[in-house]
Each structure stands twice: as C-alpha cells, then as structure tokens.
Image (tube, rainbow, N blue to C red):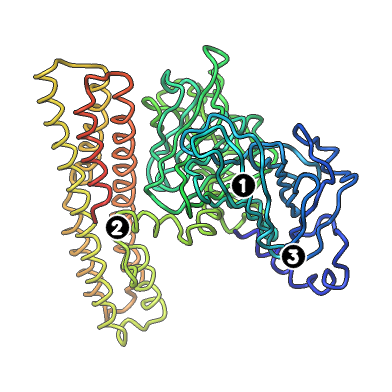
Amino acid sequence: MLGLTVAASLFLAGTAARGTQEAQYQPGTPFTYLFDTGSPSPRLLSARAISAKDGWTLVPEDDTEHTFRGDAVLLNDKLSVVLRAKGPGAEVYSQTTGKAKFRAVVMAADRTAVSVQGTSSVRIVENSPGAVELEATFQTDGATGRFSVGYRLTTGEAMLEMTGGPSAERFFVWCKTRYVVVPDFFGDDMVFTAATGDLSRFGLPAENFFLSLIEGGDSIMMCVWPSRRQDAHAILTGEGAQRVIRGCEVQGGEGSTLSVALLDTANIWHEEVPTEERVRRGRGIDWRPPFDAKWRVDRPSAGPFTVSSDLSKAQLENSGPPPRDAIPTPTIVYPLDRTVATPLAAVCPIDVLRSTLGVGPCQYILQTEGLASDSNPTPDHVISWVERQFAKHKEGEAADEIKEQLAQMSDHVRHAQARIDRYAAFGREVQTLLKTEEARRGESEAARGLSDTVAYVARTADAGRRTHEPAERAAGLADAIVRLIGREESLAECQRLGLEVRRIGAEQDRTLSTCRMAVRWLKVQARMCVIRDPGSAELAKEIQARAERFLNEK
C-alpha cells in the first residue's frame, strides 16, 4: 500500500535507534511490537486497557522462545491485535485516530466446529521491528478437537494476514457490517444487505476480495485471498428489523491465506437517500468526502446489482451523483482508487489489491479472463506509447515498432471480443437448459432468478456489437494511425483516433468484468437454489458445474 512508503522510510531511519533500546516501546512509530499482558482476560480488552498497557511486558526483539503468562498482543501504529488465551481468535482494534477502537474478530475453525474455546498453545514465529508472527493452536468442539492458524502483522500496515494450519478449514471475520460490497472495477458493483434474501447465509460472487462497510461510516474492512477457488459467504442473524450481517466466511485450508485490511478515516464511506428537493434540482446526495480520490457511487438496480459510477471529490461536492429516473434512490459512496491528489497516507481498496495480489484492476481482469501477456498490448497501453512517439516526432524511426505494437493490440482486441462472444453463447446455452427444465417441471421461483441472470449475461455480451464490430473497428483505426506516419502535424489526429481505440478497449473491459460478475453470481444462485427448492438439485448442480468450467477456461 502507498501508506507503507512512509512507514518504510521511518522504519529505515529508526531501526538503529530501536536496536540500542530493544526493551523500549515507542508509541506512534510504525514498528511492530509483541506484548504479554501478564494475565489472561476473560473478555474483550477495553480501549483504556489497550492504551494504558498496565502490567504488560514487551517481549524483546528476536525473542521467539517467550512463554506467555497472559494474552499475546501484536501491534504497530495502525492496529492492535489481541490473541486472548480464552478468546476465539484475533481481536482487531484500529488505532489510527490515536485511540483504540474494536473492529473485528478474525478467526478460523475446523469443518464441524460450532464454537472455539481458546488457545492451547501460542508459538512465536517472528519477532522483529519489521514483522511479528504468531502460530496459535485453538481448542474446538469439532471433530478434530483443535486446529492451528498463523497471524502476521507487519510494519506500518493496517492489515493482518491469517494463514491456515492443520484443520483450519474455514476463515471468519466478525464485524458490525452494514453492507458487503463486491467491487467490479470496470462494471457495476454488487451490494448485499441484511435484506438480501431470507437465508441465514448467502454466497458472495467474489473471486479474491470483498469490502465490509462497517456501521458508523468510519471504517471499511477489505478481505483478500489469493485463490479464486476459495468461496466466500455472508452470515446473518436476527429477524425482521433486527436482522444484521454478522460477518463473513471464506474457505480456508492448510496453507491458505486471508488478508484483512482496515481502511479507517472519518466518513470514509457514506449512505444517503437524496431529498426530493435535490432530486428535482437534478442533484444527488449532500455530502463532502474526507479526501481526494476516485469515489465509487453505487445505487440499487435489481436485487444486489447496482448502477455504479466513479466521481471525483469536486464532482461530489459540487452536485453529487445525478439522481436516477428522478427518484430519490439510496446511494452508497466509498473510495475505490487514488488520484494524483490523494494524500499519501490515505489507503484505497485498489492500493490493498496491489499490495496483496500484486496487480492493479486492469491486469486483474486480464488475468482472470486469460488475456494477460508480458507485452501488455491493451488499447490504452499501446496507444499511450504510440502517442508519445508522435509527440516526440519519432514516429518515423519507430515506424516498424509502431506497426508491430498496433498489430498486437488489434490481436488483443480480437481475443477479448472472442471471450465476450463466448459469454453470450454461454448465456444462451444456459437459457436453453432452463427452458427445457421449465417444460419438464414447470416454472419455479428459483429457476426464474437464474433465468434473469443468464439473460443479463447474454444481453450484456451482445451489447458491444450494436453499432460496430469491435475487432474490425480497432484494426481499421490502427491502420489509420499507421498512415499518419511521416505526415506533418499528425499528433492531433493520432490522439483523436487513439481516443476511439481507447473507448473500444474500455467497453470491452466493462463488458468482460460485468459478464464475469454475473456468471459468478449465477454460480452462487445455483448453489442457494437447492436450499429453497430441493427438487432443483440436479439442475442447480449442472449449472454450477457449467459456470465453474466457464470461469476457469482461458
């Protein structure tokens, strides 16, 4: 994350100082520390206890043989993580405001456990200014009786990494969640609330990450995992008005990891229904973002689907997102990515994505669709390079390379369009399967929901061909750019043509991203179908299998 850049410089500047004062704790510095509270607590530690540290002992740097008499506490300047001997897992407190605030319990469990009854052992794996890592074995009422899990906290990061050990087959994050958001960087997000369905848990169409917007608007929790085969679910409790999202579960397993990042800032996310007066005036919500960023604005569409847009801080302050259909629509706003004006210390979800998975949004969607390559011949990348050659008047000497780059770009657009066409074919294929089942068994509510989703996939995939054949259009524009080589004052025309190419690439990105999200949701819907309609089990299993194969094919 970009915030780590500052932390790393402080770390390098201060390492020598800590080396000469190993037994001293330096509050407010980004270093990692490990404490022993001296006696186990039967309940969550208070903010005062975290701040005062009465009776706590600092475990000296590099001491990995320490035996804990009380609870273990890992901390840096962003987080305090308490591993109570009588607790179910890691209890996470944010402290970016200078005062500890409890946020979540991050824990694991074996496959059959109903409750976790505390630790039977805690082993120190690493204890340095750069990172503290513990391995804890917990006792449970499950079939195995115990499981192991690792927790790691690093310098200056508001992120805890959990690694599954033996029998740690499920990961849980319990926090006061208002909304669960599955972001779609190029398409529309999916947003889930306690009113999403009536089951005690529902699947999330997330492949590697989701956001929990924590009650109060001052914190977002982002969960990230590396394998697209790790399923995720939201867990709900209560009835009626008391129904809430209690937390989320991610599939674990020995060696599996889950990174939990806390994005803490006052008003970091916002929800509002615009007043009728603002709607009549063509304005949206009345709210001021806390910092410059690319702010994602989500408004409900159908079920968990939303209509998403990206606005700057200035756009939000001046008028807010324009209302949809002149109706006061619930609106959710959160920061998605940074801009050149974003403060260095601010952290956005895409920063976390880059830090944990090592890719940005464009490369992420290319990788998931099997379109990534070392040369990265995307329209935006190639056109940016070509425009630089024209701007420097070097297009003549770079003519052969320009032709090669544009040819690779045209191939990329062709391959992307072929993938989009496969989405359309997949949608029609599943529609046929559902119609056959309907003729055999009659229409069911569960099947109707599946039909709506596959129709959306087919409709979205076909939409890009309404005005032109994207691959042919991109190739024609590339040829037109090549013909500009050697002409006087050709930069402006190159930029005009390049803008059209970029639009084709952006539309393909959006279509691929939107279709992939919908097929993931179809897979989740099919899994939940069996609970609502046991008679649809065979159909649901077939659709799940087809969706899984399609998402994995490249």
Position in image of residue 292 (x %, y %): 62, 49
Give the mark, 3 or 1, whose residue is nearer the N terminus. Answer: 3
- SS state under label 1: strand
The residue identified by callout 1 is 137
For this view, does 461 lie left or right of residue 380? left
Residue beneath the point at 29% across and 34% down: 522
> How far apart in space, not on screen, are marks 3 and 1 (Cα)?
24 Å
Q: Nearer the viewer, residue 291 or 80?
A: 80
- SS state under label 2: helix
For this view, does 94 lie left or right of residue 408? right
> How far apart in space, not on screen, are marks 1 and 2 (Cα)?
57 Å
Q: Quadrant of the C terminus?
A: bottom left
Give the mark, 3 or 2, whose residue is nearer the N terminus. Answer: 3
Q: Nearer the viewer, residue 173 or 497?
A: 173
As drawn, the label of residue 129 is 3
Give the mark, 1 or 2, whose residue is nearer the N terminus. Answer: 1
Amino acid identity at mark 2: Glu
Classify mark 2: residues with Cα within 10 Å, few (<14), some (14-19) or many (20+).
some
Amino acid identity at mark 1: Thr
The residue identified by callout 2 is 500
Amino acid identity at mark 3: Pro
For this view, does 141 lie left or right of residue 119? left
- SS state under label 3: loop
The residue mark sitting in front, 3 or 1, is 1
Residues under numbered marks 3 and 1 in contact, where contact means CB atoms less than 8 Å apart: no
Residue at the top extreme of this rendering: 240
The residue mark sitting in front, 1 or 2, is 1
Residues under numbered marks 1 and 2 in contact, where contact means CB atoms less than 8 Å apart: no
